[in-house]
Image (cartoon, rainbow, N blue to C red):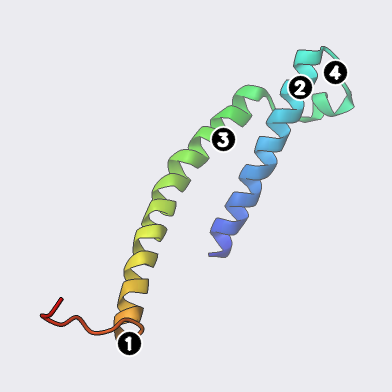
Amino acid sequence: MALLETRLRIDVLCGLMYLIQERQLKSRQLGRLNFRLPSLELLDDVGFKSILFGFPLLTLALISGSLWAEHAAIVLHLRPARSGRR
């Protein structure tokens, strides 16, 4: 879990660096930070790969969480038992 949280923080930082650098390039005001940031191509590639990595994991987490919640509700008797009557 800590690995996924660390990965998320890295992705957020890459996204912020992309936005900062793109804004500086569009406004044609290159600052000191522009020369220290990675290229837009590299940041875009990292963002794309993080989506390819993160989306299936998020989908799997949502599905397994919903299955666990259903099981926990049945085991802990949080739902009334289903009867044949309506």
Q: In this view, does 82 lie to the left or right of 42?
A: left
* Residue 63 drawn at (x, y percent): 34, 59
Secondary structure at badge 4 equals loop
Check the image and report above or below for 83 versus 46: below
> Nearer the observer, disc 2 or disc 4?
2
Residue furthest to the right: 32
Disc 4 crowd, CA 10 A, few/some/many (<14, 14-19, 20+): few
Q: Which residue is drawn at 31% across and 86% down?
A: 75
Mark 3 and mark 4 lie on one chain; the one further toward the N terminus is: 4
Query: Which one is in front, 83 or 18?
Result: 83
Q: Residue at x 65, y 23 (%)?
A: 40
Quadrant in the rendering for residue 46 = top right
Query: Which residue has dot 3 on it?
Result: 46
Q: Distance between the residues labelled 3 and 2?
A: 18 Å
Mark 3 and mark 2 lie on one chain; the one further toward the N terminus is: 2
Q: In this view, does 76 lie to the left or right of 6?
A: left
Q: Quadrant of the C terminus?
A: bottom left
Whether the residues at callouts 1 and 3 have beta carbons within 8 Å, the answer is: no
Secondary structure at badge 1 equals loop
Query: Which residue has dot 1 on it?
Result: 77
Mark 1 and mark 4 lie on one chain; the one further toward the N terminus is: 4
* Residue 39 drawn at (x, y percent): 68, 24
Query: Which residue has dot 2 on it?
Result: 23
Q: Residue at x 60, y 23 (%)?
A: 41
In the rendered structure, which amino acid carries the disc numbered 2?
Arg
Mark 1 and mark 2 lie on one chain; the one further toward the N terminus is: 2
Mark 2 and mark 4 lie on one chain; the one further toward the N terminus is: 2
Query: Which residue has dot 4 on it?
Result: 30
In the rendered structure, which amino acid carries the disc numbered 1?
His
Whether the residues at callouts 1 and 2 have beta carbons within 8 Å, the answer is: no
In the rendered structure, which amino acid carries the disc numbered 3?
Val
Query: Which one is in front, 71 or 1?
Result: 71
